[in-house]
Image (cartoon, rainbow, N blue to C red):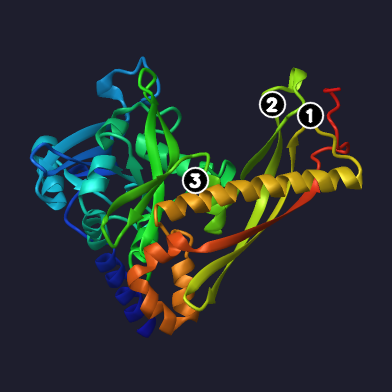
Amino acid sequence: MKPLVALLSAIAAALVLSGCWSNMELTDRAFVQAAAIDLSDRGQYRLTAQIYKPGGMNAADAAVPESEKSYIAIMTENRSLLGAIRDATNELGRKLQLSHMRSLMIGEETAKTRNIGQILDFFTRDHEPRGNISVVIAKGAASRYLLIPPFIETTMGQQFKEIEHKSSSYSGKTLEVTLTDLDIRSKEEVPFAVVPYFRLVKEQRKLASAHGLAVIDFAKGTMTGFIPPETTPYVIILMNKFQGGVVELPCDNGGRQKGLADSFEIRKADATIDPVVTGNDLALGILVKLEGSIGELSCRRVVTNEEITEFTTEVSREVGRRLQEALLLLQRQKADVIGVGERLSRHHHRLWRQWKPEWPNRFADGDFHIEVKAKLTNTGIQSGESKFVK
């Protein structure tokens, strides 16, 4: 009898637990892939939501009619983001569902004039958005970027997510930054953060590209600086978040090699920043260790031990020079995105309480010494010279 009672209890429990968690059907929802936020002429939020369209065709195909593409875009305007999201129902006939969002794009003007923390507060407070949403700043109106046909991905929201991930891993010219990352950074002693900065590079081709990093000061709530793409990899190295990229050593021997360069592919980069306090002065000791391989040789020969040493010395010198430029840029912008203040707050508590109110100026005036040690792990082939260029 007991086994029968247990079986009936299990069946009853399964019937109860198998119910839906809400009374809304899939056809009642519109799944948002990406959202863009700008300011209207009246100073209100202008929300552009890119919505996945089930059964649609790849939008990258120019021959696909607008009505058959894999996404649609809805634009609404309201004094609050929640109001703008709810207003989309008036045009769409479905409730916007944010649980599948891949990217959140904020227009540059909005980022410079409106408190970004207030915008992010909605997406962290609401129960639907996930913490792994990518956050980016867009040059110009962010809405334009969600109207571009994607190259390979189904929607631009997914394409922006993939650009961040792959570029961070292979070129080092952007950084993958999520909603959770910014939530954590906003609560730190020095609430600075960097997020990917996108721009339209060729309007006629409707091509969007990652183009450096935007600096956000959460104490002010706005975008306060910009890091160009050529400096971005070296800022990321100082942040100790570098995953991969290339260092180019220009050919200086003229002739057929004029304008070319040899390349060193960085596969590992470890940065150690040691704040040194002497009286009322701050100095930074920075040690960067690189490991990598030769990507290509156009004008150098790397065969003997002496040539290997000369090559790695050139790499160290070039990276050191670029790191110095990156740190000087951060000092000019008074943007401690590399975590010096955080180290001081953990190891020099009393001093940090004195320095914190004027930390941006102290960071800008600090001296620094950079040392780079590059290690060549392999030449890519058995020979350390080009087989084709003589």
**Mark closest to the chain's N terminus, 1 or 3:** 3
* Type of amino acid under label 3: His
Which residue matches tag 2?
260
Number of residues whose C-alpha sits closer than 10 Å to that of mark 1, classed few (under 14), some (14–19) or many (20 or more): many
Relative to 185, 52 lies left or right: left
* Point 31% across, 32% down: residue: 145
Q: Is residue 93 above or below residue 57?
A: below
Question: Which of the two discs, 2 and 3, sits closer to the camera?
Answer: 2
* Type of amino acid under label 1: Cys
Assess whether mark 3 and mark 2 are in contact (beta carbons under 8 angstroms): no
**Residue placed furthest toward the right:** 304
* Type of amino acid under label 2: Leu
- The secondary structure type at the circle numbered 1 is loop
Q: Position of residue 70 (x, y in %)?
A: 32, 30
Relative to 174, 5 lies left or right: left
- The secondary structure type at the circle numbered 3 is helix
Assess whether mark 2 and mark 1 are in contact (beta carbons under 8 angstroms): yes
Give the Cα distance between marks 1 and 3: 33 Å
Most foreground residue, 347 or 254? 254
Let me know if residue 349 appears in the view: yes
**Mark closest to the chain's N terminus, 1 or 2:** 2
Relative to 229, 107 lies left or right: left
Which residue matches tag 1?
299
Number of residues whose C-alpha sits closer than 10 Å to that of mark 2, classed few (under 14), some (14–19) or many (20 or more): some
**Mark closest to the chain's N terminus, 2 or 3:** 3
The tag on residue 165 is 3
* Point 37% across, 79% down: residue: 354
